[in-house]
Image (cartoon, rainbow, N blue to C red):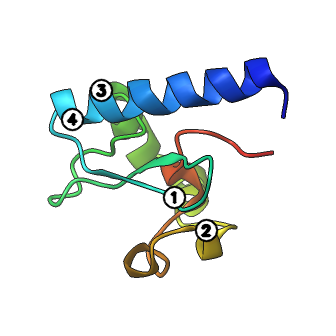
Amino acid sequence: MTNQASKLRIELRERASHWATANAIRYYSSLGQAPTILFSKSADLSSHGNFQPDSWVAIQASDAWIRRLRKPHSRSDALPVEMRATAKELDSSLNNS
């Protein structure tokens, strides 16, 4: 990863965690040298930290998107043990590909 890309990832991670904290949104970090912020559904399932409220409502109305939301996180080994069983691909604030 280039130095600029690394700096951008760090800034995005910092902004994501700050935004989540300021808005009382559930989140956690992946493990490793360059952790990623991951968001969870709210306890009452009415929202998800990785989606704007209107988008979340639209997603919940789409069978295709609901199926996509169920896709397990592909790098569960890079997540805290307690999150591995429930983490989903779309919980991630950054795409690592």
Residue at (62, 52) in percent of width and height: 33
The disc, 1 or 4, on the residue closer to the chain's N-terminal end is: 4
Residue 83, percent across and down?
A: 41, 73
Task: Estimate how packed mark 3 is, as few (under 14), some (14 to 19) or many (20 or more) residues with alpha carbons within 10 Å.
Answer: few
> In the rendered image, which quarter is residue 6 located in?
top right
The residue labelled by disc 4 is 21
Q: Which mark is residue 78?
A: 2
Secondary structure beneath dot 1 equals loop
Quadrant where the C terminus lies? top right
* Residue 89 seen in the current view: yes
Mark positioned earlier in the residue sequence (2 or 4): 4
Q: Secondary structure at mark 4?
A: helix
* SS type, badge 2: helix
**9 or 42: which is nearer to us?**
9
Tell me the number on the disc at residue 30: 1
Mark 2 crowd level (few <14, some 14–19, many ≥20, 10 Å Cα): some
From the top left corner, tell me how far across and down residue 50 is, in percent.
Answer: 42, 39
Q: Which tag, 1 or 3, sits closer to the chain's start?
A: 3
Which residue is nearer to you in this view: 9 or 72? 9
Asked if marks 1 and 2 touch (Cβ < 8 Å), the reply is yes
Between tags 1 and 3, which lies in front?
1
